[in-house]
Image (cartoon, coloured by chain):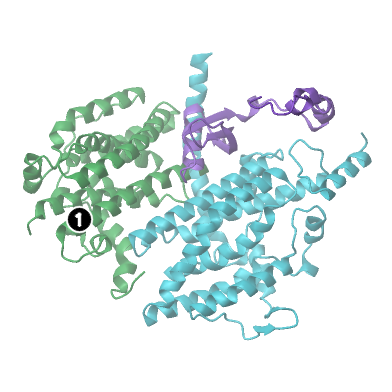
Chain colours: A purple, B green, C cyan
Amino acid sequence: MAQDNQGMLWEVFIQTKPGQPHRHCGSVHGHDRELALQNARDVYTRRNEGTNLWVVPSNLIVASSPEDIGPFFEPANDKVYRHPTFYTIPEGITHM
Amino acid sequence: MKNEGLFNYLLRLADTNLILGHRLSEWCGHAPYLEEDIAMANIALDMIGQANALFQYAAKTEAKGRTEDDLAYMRNEREFVNTLLSEQPNGDFAMTIVRQFLSDVFDFHFYESLKSSKDEMLSALAVKGHKEVTYHLRHTTAWMERLGDGTEESHSRLQKALNELWCYTDDLFELNEGDKRLVKEGIAVDPASIQNAWIKTVDDVLAKAKLVKPAGVWQQKGSREGIHSEHLGFLLAEMQHLHRAYPQAQW
Amino acid sequence: MDTNQLEQNFDAKLARNESIEPKDWMPDNYRKHLIRQISQHAHSEIVGMLPEGNWITRAPSLRRKMVLLAKVQDEGGHGLYLYSAAETLNISREELIDQLLTGKAKYSSIFNYPSLTWADIGAIGWLVDGAAIMNQVMLQRTSYGPYARAMVRICKEESFHQRQGYEIMTVLAKGTAEQKAMAQDALNRWWWPSLMMFGPPDEKSPNTANAIKWKIKRETNDELRQKFVNQTFPQADIIGLKLPDPDLKWNESKGGFDFGTPNWEEFYNIIAGNGPCNKARISARTKAHNEGAWVREAANAYAEKKKAVLA
């Protein structure tokens, strides 16, 4: 018999309401795209959780590493001028 | 009884949903892989849910104080009017998929047509049923294609299942005198009116699944009059035994 | 970074109650402990489908039938979430299933008891799910991120499981004399095995120390067991059932119940494979796995063909 094959691993993203972003909710197995999508529907939307679904092969996701935390994310710490509170405006100005 | 025809028609639909849902539920914990286990339970839950609603409506229509559980648990083999196809044993996964697929195609076209029933309740149940079966059909079609065009083994199992179950397909379209009256009143669906659509959908999928449609098969019929295969009796014995063993009990 | 440094970082993270994520460095033993615990948990969900699944086709009303099917289906879903969490530790579902079927991996001993009557479905939901929920509520704060997230989802879904079991028991206890006897009998048979679900006493639990140190577990077996007894007593009392323990009595000084000792010899025997249903459970899983092999192969072959066409 051929080696056991439980199907590829896919990551599932659900949109819970129209207009909302898709959020990661878990994984499923599926041998191809259609089965993966159906499996995601059958597993993750049984309690009325969704209005739209994405499935993405897990091995296609590119992720940063824990070692990247310093070089990737810390340089953003001191860029306070990217935030509106950095700027001084006269008292009484609204809608800005 | 004034509404005997409608009552009897509702039983046909309720029984078929219950028996097929029950058969599918037998897979729970035993499917080929985990995701499919969950998928089959979803279909079973849709069908038993639909049966429950239909039995409630039937009980109301009959108006003799019986409940949905009385109708499901206290009737005998000859009183059940589910289709012959629905009661066939699960067999291997190929048998289950072919049985479900042939039935889904029927329900898909049937509910589509029943949506315009003059009976408001039936029409509402048809709207709900049609949404559900549209997904069921998508699921079973996916498996028909994958098993039919998968490996040699899966292909031959699927073809064998199709050959074995084909003799129960005409039975899906049976109707009795009461049904005919309801058809005239615009309440029931005339099965003959959806037969071509059923054949076309089935043919399309069989072609994609590289299967040969059985020809010249002698057809088994009779379920509309409560004539069943021997399998139904065992199914009912298992399903009803606890309920019947304690007739005074509430659960 | 050398291993010492990595280990210090890891410990510091745990101390700050930060979760450990799949790509983080982790000690080998931590990884092994997690794979063992998560897969054991997953297998328990999957094997746990069997004793309850037995009653789906015999449930005494349409409502009970739907509820039970939905519940057993949920167990399958929970097994699936947990297998996925284990897979983030670099072990495949194929390997995990193989470990279950070859007896290398364990599952909860409770599922090796038979479900004999309908009341057992009530007792399992009430007691077995009740005990499991205690464990799982704690595990929502476990240190490994994917495991904790799976537990959050599972706890949310489990909330109806215990209630449906208790509801079954309530109806039976208020029903005919035969029904009440059926409920009490089920409670008698499932009570001690439920207490065993928390695992051996702390001083005899080989894995507890590490599990606590690594914040995989946050309460010990004995602490959880005590909580369970305290919370279950009034639930039994209110529906007129009696916990089958002559040593059970309120202890004012500890603010909890004193209770008897489970039969640990029986527990270890069941773990060793000698329970009434060990063989039946594994052979049912093996049968489903083997009989499904051609289906999985077909799905795979079909996917390969379609890829070839697209290429």
Tag 1 secondary structure: helix
Q: Chain of mark 1?
A: B
Residue occupying the point 71% across, 83% down: C252
**Neighbourhood count class around disc 1 (C-alpha, 10 Å): few under 14, some 14–19, many 20 upward:** many
Residue C200 in view (yes/no): no
Q: Amino acid at mark 1?
A: Ala
Which residue was labeled with disc 1?
B58
Task: Report the side of C290 relative to A78 (left or right).
Answer: left
Residue A26 in view (yes/no): yes
Front residue (pair B197, B89): B197
Task: Report the side of C26 relative to B27 (left or right).
Answer: right
- Above/below status of C169 relative to C307: below
Residue occupying the point 43% across, 77% down: C173
Direction front: furthest residue: A92
Please state, as top left, top right, bottom left or bottom right, where the C terminus of chain B lies in the image.
bottom left
Residue A59, percent across and down? 65, 27
